[in-house]
Amino acid sequence: MRIMRPDQLLMTKSPNDLFQFEDLKIPFSAMREVNYEGQDLPVNIYWDNAGEAEFMIGTYTIDLFADGNNVGTTTIEFK
């Protein structure tokens, strides 16, 4: 999962948190391994903001990846 702040900065914990996307290694915000077996499966991925700056007001963009593919994008607005 990649979380983009309203100011277009990617939220990351470490510069070493990278994954393969197309021909690039790109940073991720949080990751969780999931064993998909062909059925609907509820999955949560959490961002631990402990020790970080407060969330800013605005729209955050969240991209979800699986097996090197972008499988979904959504936004959330903090007021």
Image (cartoon, grey):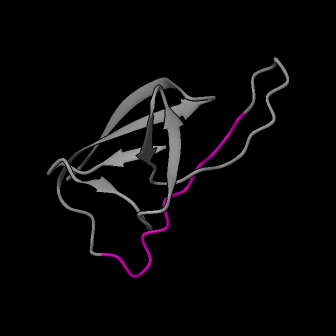
Residue 57 magenta: no
Q: Nearer the viewer, residue 67 or 45?
A: 67
Outermost residue, right side: 37
Outermost residue, bottom side: 51
Vertical placement of residue 35 versus 19, above or below: above
Q: Nearer the viewer, residue 47 or 31?
A: 31
x 49%, y 51%: residue: 18
The image position of residue 47, as x and y in percent, is 49, 59
Q: Toward which corner of the image does residue 33 lie, by quadrant?
A: top right
Residue 44 magenta: yes
Vertical placement of residue 49 versus 31, above or below: below
Q: Main secondary structure of the magenta part?
A: loop
x 81%, y 35%: residue: 35
Vertical placement of residue 77 versus 79, above or below: above
The image position of residue 2, as x and y in percent, is 42, 44
The image position of residue 45, as x and y in percent, is 58, 49
Outermost residue, left side: 7
Number of residue marks: 0
Q: Toward which corner of the image does residue 67 lie, by quadrant?
A: top right
**Magenta stretch?**
42-52
Q: In this image, 79 relative to 61: left or right?
A: left
